[in-house]
Image: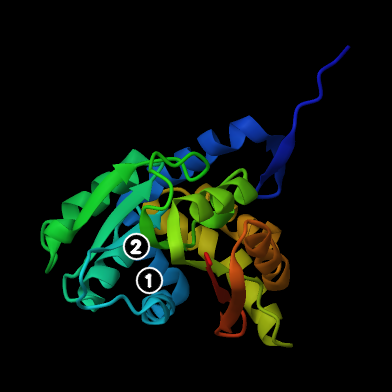
Amino acid sequence: MTETRETTHFGEQTVALEDKQGLVDKVFHDVADRYDLMNDLMSVGVHRLWKDAMVAELAPPKAGSRPYHVLDMAGGTGDIGERIVNASLGYADVIVSDINTNMLRVGAERAKSWRYPGQVRFQEANAEELPFESNSFDAYTIAFGIRNVPRIQKALHEAHRVLKRGGRILVLEFSQADVPGFDAVYKFYSDQFIPPMGKVVTGDAQPYQYFIESIRKFPKPTEFSAMIAQAGFKRVKHQSFTGNIATLFSGWKL
């Protein structure tokens, strides 16, 4: 009897579920050193505003009777972690975690010049099987990384597990533009400009073809909000940015 293997998508390709993580790892390993530069070029710098809005929504405290612990998942290069620590004036303690060691290498090197380098540490981890104790973080953040996780629902359940009661999840992710007229322009730009730009900057267009395809496969905001609620989070909401190019999701562990 032939065994049926569980499958998922890797961009437009259908792959075995257990193979996706390795394929994603290679994508990010290959572009790690130019990852943030490409984000600036692809979004014309607007991704910085989206990330600023994410941290503003989190509003990390600047003082308190106990440390404020944050897990920034898929945060390799550390740009979210740095923002959180700066917004807290060094009060927050952030673990920047990623499954890709090359992305973490880039982030750890950059952190040496940050304003509060001692408040951020980098640790390799799989979002589906976090090596952290239950009820240990005040906040869990993930920016433009959840769509690359093979078992997204499992990762959301893990986020819920490691958060303290009263803790918060914030997910920033790409969506599909839904403003009439603008959606067609955005699709044309994505298809015709981003992969060639990636080839010029990083020497390889394939990772950026995957990025585009993975965005189109990601659930719509209402669907993903339902997945967050299914993981046990309450008061789930989402807000869209720039014609729905990106969406910020949030929820609470109550």
Say if 186 sits above or below 165 in the image. below
Asked if one can make out residue 130 in the rendered structure from this viewpoint, the answer is yes
Q: Which residue is mark 1?
A: 40
Residue 133: give x, y in percent of width and height.
39, 43
The disc labelled 1 sits on which kind of residue? Asp
Which SS class for mark 2?
A: helix
Front residue (pair 155, 76): 155
45 lies left or right of 205: left
State the residue at coordinates (49%, 56%). 145
Q: How many callouts does the rendering have?
A: 2
Does residue 55 appear to the left or right of 161 in the view shown?
A: left
Q: Secondary structure at mark 1?
A: helix
Q: Amino acid at mark 2?
A: Asp
Q: Position of residue 26 (x, y in %)?
A: 46, 38
Image check: 185 left or right of 248?
Answer: right
Q: Which residue is depicted at the point 39% across and 39% down?
A: 131
Left or right of 143 on screen, residue 230 = right
Q: Is residue 211 above or below residue 191?
A: above
- Residue position marked by numbered label 2 in the rendering: 36
User: In front: 63, or 140?
Assistant: 63
Quadrant assignment, res 146: bottom right
Q: In the displayed image of the protein, which residue is found farthest to the right?
A: 1
Is residue 208 in view from this perspective?
Answer: no
Q: Nearer the viewer, residue 218 or 184?
A: 218
Whole-angstrom CA distance, mark 2 to mark 1, is 6 Å
Look at the picture and state if 56 lies above or below 253: below
